[in-house]
Amino acid sequence: MHRSAPRLSRILACAAVPVMLVAVGCSSDSGSDGKKSAGSSSSGTAGSKSPEPTVEPAKFADLPDPCASIGKKTIEDLVPDAKKKGGTAGGSTDLSVRSSCSWNGLDDQGVKGSQYRWLDVGFTRFDSDQSLGSGAKRATADYTKQVTKAKESEGAKKVAAEPAAGIGDEATLVTYGLSKTDEDFVYATVVARTGNVVVTLTYNGAGYAGAKTPSSGDMVKGARKAAEEAIAAVGKTGQSAGSEDAGKSPEEDTKKDQADAKGDAGSEDSPKSKATPKS
């Protein structure tokens, strides 16, 4: 009886060993699987990359003919006796990115003097670029720049600026006076943006040989009408989801183009250089 008790204890102890081994084995396998699973999840997260955000395509892929962007009837009304009815185109290395046109004329009213008028319209288009942003975003930045430039015109007096509702996506009207060639000129400039295109239109005039200085109201009315037609002309060029010249910047135009444009503006602004009012 005393011998059988220790023997029974040894048998039970041996029987318990496999159970413990199985439990340990399961626990070990579970830990291994857990490590593998965690490793796989970690490597999967590290390997994946977020796709780069795509830039919104430019709305307009071309610009209208600047000298045909404003109707003939409007030109006749705003610039009586224009020297060139079809306008004078400004220089540009790429007319799909930057273009301009101007008209000037001296309306001789005999003993009442003469009325001088000058009208200029310029277009600048921006393409979408992955590093620079969408065409609309770039155009918005240029729009702000052009408004500031108009308000800071050298020699300008009584400068005023206000939103010009109903012209493009956004527009600003800038008015001021300027004295030159011994006459008082009245200016009205409309800077407008439609999509990825910025339109800058300037209309000014003066009375010569005793003629009255044009009213600011008349100059504003004329500038707004011409700007509306210029914006409409941009829309008629058609829309495109992209452009073959994507990434090209208007700043790439040569200094010569800028000098030519300034030369045109300077000569057109002063009728005394090319025409002498009759008394």
Image (cartoon, rainbow, N blue to C red):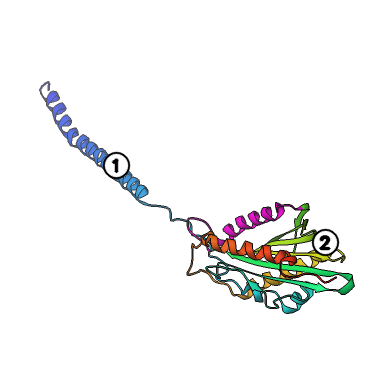
Residue 217: % across, % down: 84, 63
- In which image quadrant can residue 147 be found? bottom right
State the quadrant of the N terminus: top left
Q: Is residue 250 visible?
A: no
Magenta span of residues: 127-156
In the picture, measured across the screen, residue 113 lies left or right of residue 161, that is right
Image point (87%, 74%), residue name: 110
Considering only vertical position in the picture, is 20 above or below 222?
above
Mark 2: amino acid: Ser
Q: Is residue 130 magenta?
A: yes
Residue 206: % across, % down: 80, 64
Q: Nearer the viewer, mark 1 or mark 2?
A: 2
Q: Residue at label 2?
A: 216
Q: What label sits on residue 35 in the rendered view?
A: 1
Residue 117: % across, % down: 77, 68
Residue farthest to the left, as pictured: 3
Image point (73%, 61%), residue name: 189
- In which image quadrant can residue 193 be found? bottom right
State the quadrant of the C terminus: bottom right
Mark 1: amino acid: Lys
Give the SS element for disc 2: helix
- Residue in front for this viewpoint, 262 or 5: 262
